[in-house]
Amino acid sequence: MAGAFDFKKENRDLYLPKTKPGVIDVPEMTFIMVDGKGNPNTAQAYKTALELLYGFSYSIKMSKMGGAKPKDYFEYVVPPLEGLWWGEGEYFDGKNIIDKDKLHWTSMIRQPDFVTREVFEEARRVLAKKKPGLDLSLARLVSFTEGLCAQIMHIGSYDGEPATIEVLDGFIAGSDYKSDISQTRRHHEIYLGDPRKCAPDKLKTVIRHPVVRR
């Protein structure tokens, strides 16, 4: 019997880039998203966002156990946490240092293609019973197409990301593309390691920046 579908292994171009930068055209995917503001290390809003994202994601994953198994359901590994980040009226590319309390973010987790609006709403109903104090209205189901991006694998602590972004910026500057970070296209991070379980120097984070052709 085949194992559970693992998006990281099956879509290696999206989740396992090399430490040498490259360009990728990111296709449309379905995400559950939660927006917020504040320092991710201290803000209650960020903790709530993660509780929502994992609550919905695992409710959908375990929906096979009840009487509402989604059409076309398959066994899978819940994809990694991702984040879009921007500043409060400031240009932010993950490299320039700004007050973390002023950070804005969209935290998100990819969902399999079988996750329709109906599947999402059923997960909301199930989660409402398990977590009656959680504001489920903060989460939304979104089809998101990121398009052309340059990306690189960062290995190390989150505070060490600026050096890796310098490498990414240098690659973009010497390519047929230019940066397209804006109020609609954001600095993007994909978290492949759990900082609670992994040594900081071994954390893996995909860093992705939107680009356009020159």
Image (tube, grey):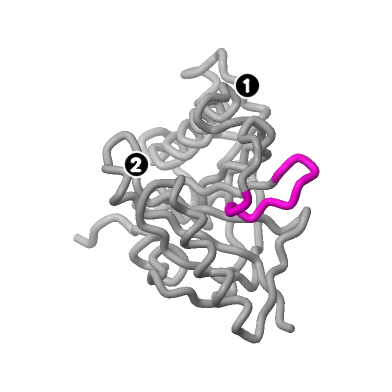
Task: Classify 173 as above or below 163.
Answer: below
Crowding around mark 2 (Cα neighbors within 10 Å: few <14, some 14 to 19, many 20+) is few
Considering depth in this image, is 196 or 87 the residue closer to the camera? 87
**What's the residue type where badge 2 is placed?**
Asp
Q: Magenta segment range?
A: 87-96
Crowding around mark 1 (Cα neighbors within 10 Å: few <14, some 14 to 19, many 20+) is few
Residue 75, percent across and down? 34, 52
Residue 204, percent across and down? 36, 54
The residue sitting at 78% across, 53% down in the picture is 183
Residue 116, percent across and down? 60, 49
Q: Quadrant of the C terminus?
A: bottom right
Considering depth in this image, is 105 or 94 the residue closer to the camera? 94
Q: Which residue is mark 1?
A: 135
Tag nearer the camera, 1 or 2 = 2
The residue sitting at 42% across, 37% down in the picture is 58
The residue sitting at 44% across, 51% down in the picture is 160
Considering depth in this image, is 120 or 56 the residue closer to the camera? 56
Q: Principal SS element in the magenta part? A: loop
Residue 213 is left or right of residue 53, and the answer is right
The answer to whether mark 1 and mark 2 are in CB contact below 8 A is: no
Residue 144 is left or right of residue 1, and the answer is right
**What's the residue type where badge 1 is placed?**
Asp
In this view, which residue lies farthest toward the left? Answer: 1
Q: Callout 1: helix, strand or loop?
A: loop
Residue 95 in magenta stretch: yes
Q: Callout 2: helix, strand or loop?
A: loop
The residue sitting at 55% across, 77% down in the picture is 171
Residue 199 is left or right of residue 64, and the answer is left
Q: Which residue is mark 2?
A: 194
